[in-house]
Image (tube, rainbow, N blue to C red):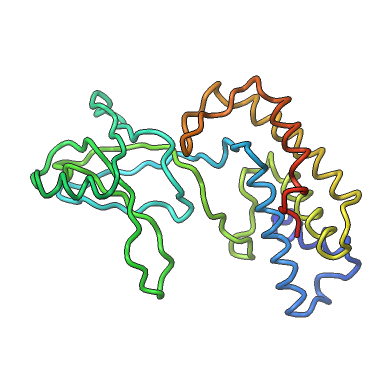
């Protein structure tokens, strides 16, 4: 069975009428750009927040360590960070502005059980990708298992070394149809059969995702989480705006 990257390139080759092994280096790069656009369109469907773009981040603190790396896909935490395991009795760790944590650190530099967190962007040296860091206050005085749900931001580009779509096997068809719709738009400059197939697949995927979500996934950027019963409004908005709002190639 082929991986997702091989499958989508093969399907695009069939659509444009040129086998993959006959693509030039430039054509191959152009197809990869189309795939990135297709993935972006599927991951960001208007005002719907996919549950699979809100993964759990688990890590354990170390005594005396104040800063911790965050996943490369991290955008922001959705809720407070909670203590996991035997330490669940501690109150959740709430977010503060980074400047406030600096002030608190200057006032209280001792270690203890973390009460607050902030996220910071370290200096970018140009040699490595810049990723956000988590800062805790007080600086942990012990090993505390922590857990937080975060919103995924940047999506890693597909390649032979990263050959699978986000969202798991259940969403493979969604991404495939999105990439084919992006190809149709870019190569043939139209919104036709592939566009319609993507719209239908997207509507079905949103309905299924809303069915699986709890009634409220929490706040994101000041907006309350999606309500499970809002399927009709979500789909109506999405189908009306996906390609009309500049998401097309």
Question: Where 62 sits versus 112, above or below?
Answer: below
Q: Toward which corner of the image does residue 234 lie, by quadrant?
A: top right
Residue 133: give x, y in percent of width and height: 33, 54
For the C terminus, the quadrant is bottom right
Question: Where 249 sits versus 219, above or below?
Answer: below
Residue 45: give x, y in percent of width and height: 67, 43
> With 129 as the anchor, is 189 left or right in this view?
right
Residue drawn where x is 76% and y is 33% of the image: 204
Q: Toward which corner of the image does residue 179 lie, by quadrant?
A: bottom right
Residue drawn where x is 74% and y is 78% of the image: 26
> With 183 as the anchor, is 160 left or right in this view?
left
Q: Toward which corner of the image does residue 231 lie, by quadrant?
A: top right
The total number of labels drawn is 0
Residue 124: give x, y in percent of width and height: 37, 69
> With 202 as the anchor, is 156 left or right in this view?
left
Residue 128: give x, y in percent of width and height: 41, 70
Residue drawn where x is 88% and y is 57% of the image: 190
> With 3 as the anchor, is 194 left or right in this view?
right
Residue drawn where x is 87% and y is 52% of the image: 191
Q: Residue furthest front?
A: 245
Foreground: 238 or 73? Answer: 238
């Amino acid at each position: 069975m082929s991986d997702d990257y091989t499958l989508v390139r093969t399907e695009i080759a069939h659509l444009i009428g040129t086998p993959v092994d006959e693509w030039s280096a430039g054509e191959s790069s152009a197809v990869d750009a189309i795939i990135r656009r297709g993935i972006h369109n599927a991951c960001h469907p208007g005002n719907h927040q996919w549950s699979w773009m809100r993964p759990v981040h688990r890590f354990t603190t170390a005594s005396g360590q104040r800063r911790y790396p965050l996943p490369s896909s991290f955008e922001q935490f959705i809720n407070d960070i909670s203590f996991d395991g035997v330490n669940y009795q501690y109150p959740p760790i709430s977010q503060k502005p980074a400047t406030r944590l600096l002030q608190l650190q200057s006032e209280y530099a001792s270690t203890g059980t973390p009460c607050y967190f902030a996220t910071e962007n370290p200096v970018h040296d140009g040699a490595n990708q810049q990723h956000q860091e988590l800062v805790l206050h007080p600086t942990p005085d012990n090993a505390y298992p922590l857990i937080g749900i975060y919103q995924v931001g940047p999506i890693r580009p597909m390649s032979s070394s990263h050959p699978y779509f986000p969202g798991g096997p259940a969403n493979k068809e969604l991404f495939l149809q999105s990439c084919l719709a992006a190809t149709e738009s870019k190569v043939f400059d139209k919104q036709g059969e592939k566009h319609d197939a993507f719209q239908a697949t997207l509507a079905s995927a949103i309905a299924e995702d809303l069915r699986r979500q709890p009634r409220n996934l929490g706040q994101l950027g000041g907006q309350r989480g999606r309500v499970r019963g809002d399927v009709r409004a979500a789909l109506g908005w999405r189908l009306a705006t996906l390609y009309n709002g500049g998401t097309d190639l």
